[in-house]
Image (cartoon, coloured by chain):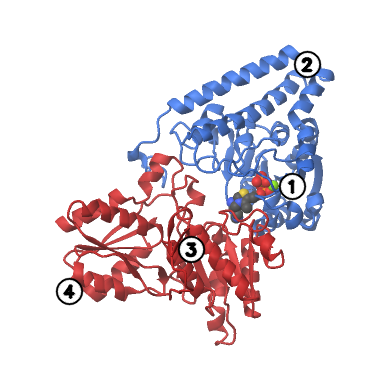
Amino acid sequence: MLSKGQLLEFYRQMHLIREFERECERQYTRGNIKGFLHVYSGEEAIAVGAISTLQPQDYVVTHYRDHGHALARGVNSKAVMAELFGKSTGCSKGRGGSMHMFDAEKNFMGGYAIVGGQLPVAAGLALASKYRGEDRIALCFLGDGALNEGEFHEAMNLAAIWKLPVIYFCENNLYGMGASAANNLVMYQEIYKMAAAYGIEGIQVDGNDVLAVRELMEQVTHRVRQGQGPIFVEARTYRLRGHSIADPANYRPTEEVAYWQSRDPIPSYREWLLKDGGATQAEIDQIHAAVERELVVAAEFAEKSPFPVAADLYRWVYQEDGA
Amino acid sequence: MAVISYREAVARGLREALQEDSRVFLMGEDIGPYGGSFAVTKGFWEEFGEARIKDSPLSESAIVGAGVGAAMAGLRPNVEIMTINFSLLAMDQIVNHAAKIRYMSGGQFSVPLMIRTVTGGGASVGATHSQSFEGWYASVPGLYVVVPSTPRDALGLFRTCRELGDPVLYVEHILLYGTRGEVPDEPYKIPLGQAEVKRLGRDVTIISYSRSVQVSLAAAELLATEGIQPEVVDLRTLRPLDIETVVQSVKKTHHVVVVEEAPKQGGFGAEVAAQVQRQAFEYLNAPVERVAGEEVPMPYSPPLERLAIPDADRVARAVRALLAS
Ligand SMILES: Cc1ncc(C[n+]2csc(CCOP(=O)(O)OP(=O)(O)O)c2C)c(N)n1
Ligand SMILES: [Mg+2]
């Protein structure tokens, strides 16, 4: 049973991610954030529901749409925003940017921007855990697009034959960049079934329902922790924005967008909280106010933080003396 | 002469190929309804249909490999790899198959495959998305490597590439798409292996390719105000490499600076420097100077990224120092 505190915490995290992404879009138009910006809006229930079932020692690995996973893992919003500003106080010291967030303290093992690249890495993290006999699993997020890459096949097979403690969690938002998953994957409606070909159990879940994701992942993490080998999860979801800030996403049918807007994971969860979850409007308002304050602080922190200095251009290319 | 953008020049080359040669078809990620990641193929899917504009899954290795097979079977596939960074996932098909099949089959088979891709940094997209690997590919016999710096060159070289009987890596620069320039109206072509003097000068030869040519030209303008007249040579193709045009220029200027965006160690500029010293040693008044990217994964942070990529000031400084030595 989840406590009311936990239920509200899920709401707080989802709302934080949504508002964080809005702030990113604002800062992008002001020129404070550069390059690619892929926001996670619409998919919050996945990161929040899934990551909430992990232990601190577990690993999280993800793709380039990584702000939401970082925040759900507890990476400080100031450090994520500062990273986007390219500041030395960012979680990757300004060297990574939007697509390459890392935080060792949180065992947040990175956002990987080469599609599919994180899958073998996750297998390796799980391998290290198994090798040392640790109670530690790896949770690896991937987009539906990653299933088209050879690395998906190679990693799934490797994880299966070596029975690695890794969860491959596919966020099936029905699109890659602009290409619809329907054109790329024969199995796009039932991606989870592809896992069977590797002898891996595949499970589908509603990715816009934070409690459904949470409930499933409680069982999944438990079983993977017991050493039964990898599990593959497919969550059906939708990105409410374009692929990146540069993409108006007008290749998507309006009815489809409208349908998924009506299934926005945040308002529906809020309604449930108020009706059946025992939460009050005052508690919701408090969360909203706290998140707003947090983001003002994050943006200010990012703005006031210094850029990396020129003398540090060569830092961290290799191990440093005494490091 | 019409003034068009670099993007339009590439698109025109592709469109002509599709119109004139029914063996030509396109494969690539998001080249269909989305119009291409850099909008080069905008409208193509509607114009030519999905059988010829094959929107492909995110499978770099499979689409290049399928291009190899289709080319062996007599078609003229034109594959787009969204950026050169992702070409690493297809490198096996490019290097081990496309570039070798004619030779290994004793000339029985050929791979007339054109692979278009996008190189370069400066777009603040971080270390995995800002690399310049064309120099690596230039060390592969059996492959052509083409690196246009202007709309005119982009179109003229494209027309040559699409008729070649061997695989070509045609490399566009991410920051050049919006640049504009004059393009002749007649159906001109530019042969591979023909460098071009983009600016006449007398004091120093600046050699570069792709966007670094624009950087070098900007440096030349700066230097001209100080009474230094650089000659700027655009290699235009890395393989084949036209060293003759370079040597002719060096005979006149006696000083050489090679400019490129990739990290200096092992960069293509090293090959140019080696060939220049071998073929024009007695004409050189100073060692060949190189200006290149820093030996660092591309930082995201904009001020650091600016330090990591050569700019006009850095090229100008190198020229001044060389001439003062
Ligand atoms: C190997 C590789 N190919 C292409 C790209 C360009 N690219 C970045 S994201 C993307 C779409 C990925 O779609 P998906 O995996 O479904 O993730 P989503 O954006 O939907 O979260 C593409 C094609 C890349 N980053 N890496
Ligand atoms: Mg997707």
Dot label at residue A174? 1
The residue at 40%/75% (across/down) is B193
Q: Are marks 1 and 2 on the same chain?
A: yes
CA distance separating discs 4 and 3: 34 Å
Identity, as a three-letter code, of the amino acid under mark 3: Val
Q: Are marks 2 and 3 on the same chain?
A: no
Using residue A305 as the reference point, say whether residue A177 is left or right of it.
right
Please identify the quarter of the rendering in which residue B102 is found.
bottom right
Q: Are marks 1 and 4 on the same chain?
A: no
Q: Nearer the viewer, residue A204 or B167?
A: B167
Can you tell me whether the CB of the residue at mark 1 lies under 8 Å from the nearest atom of ligand 2? yes
Q: Which residue is mark 4?
A: B282
| Secondary structure state at the residue bearing disc 4 | helix
Name the chain letter of the residue that bears numbered label 2: A
Chain B takes which shade in the image? red
Give coordinates of residue A197: x percent, y percent: 79, 58
Give the number of callouts. 4
CA distance separating discs 2 and 3: 58 Å
Q: Which residue is mark 2?
A: A279
User: Mark 4 touching mark 3, by CB under 8 A?
Assistant: no
Q: Nearer the viewer, residue B232 or B95?
A: B232
Identity, as a three-letter code, of the amino acid under mark 2: Ala
Name the chain letter of the residue that bears numbered label 4: B
Give coordinates of residue A150: x percent, y percent: 66, 59
CA distance separating discs 1 and 4: 64 Å
Identity, as a three-letter code, of the amino acid under mark 4: Glu
Q: Residues within 10 Å of mark 4 (few under 14, many from 20)?
A: few
